[in-house]
Image (cartoon, helix red, strand yellow):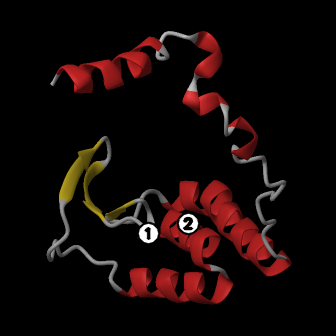
Amino acid sequence: MFSLILAILPLLGSINDPGREPWGVDAELAAKPSGITARQPSRSTRVCQSMIRFYQNHISPINGPRSSYLPSSSQYAYDAISKYGVFKGIALGCDRLMRENGETWFYPITSTDIGERKIDPVR
């Protein structure tokens, strides 16, 4: 037991020595910035998103809030196009529009300032 303490004692003394930190040895191996930037959306993505924004800013305020979902169906389509691309995003947006009705089905409900809404975000 005494020999074990004598073997560990020099190791304990090196802990407080500031020049011998074990994590300073591999500092040059730290991850460097990769230089990869976020991918720019394609032209078709920008066109679809600008059409949805036009609808949201100019047409939807005239019609009033019609969507029974949160986020609204137009915002859902915008998010789906951003996340999955034009073709899959439009397909998901159309699917959402076909499910747009007053029934609660199995969606969780939340209360907003304009009434109850079904919660169904882009996953």
Image quadrant for the N terminus?
Answer: top left
* Total tally of numbered discs in the picture: 2
* Furthest residue in direction front, as rendered: 3
Front position in the image: 51 or 49: 49
Where is residue 41 shown, x and y percent of the image? 78, 69
Binning the other alpha carbons within 10 Å of mark 1 as few (below 14), some (14 to 19) or many (20 upward) gives some
Please identify the quarter of the rendering in which residue 60 is found: bottom right
**Which residue: 48% across, 83% down?**
92
Of pointers 2 and 1, the one earlier in the residue sequence = 2
Q: Secondary structure at mark 2?
A: helix
Left or right of residue 109, residue 9 in this image: right
Q: Which residue is mark 1?
A: 122
Image quadrant for the C terminus?
Answer: bottom left
Q: CB atoms at circles 2 and 1 under 8 Å apart?
A: yes
**Which residue: 42% across, 18% down?**
10
Q: Which residue is mark 2?
A: 79
Front position in the image: 34 or 108: 34
28 over 90 or under it: above or below: above
Residue at mark 2 to residue at mark 1: CA–CA distance? 7 Å
Please identify the quarter of the rendering in which residue 113 is found: top left
**Which residue: 59% across, 68% down?**
78
73 over 4 or under it: above or below: below
What amino acid is at disc 1?
Val
Q: Secondary structure at mark 1?
A: loop
Where is residue 95 shown, x and y percent of the image? 42, 87
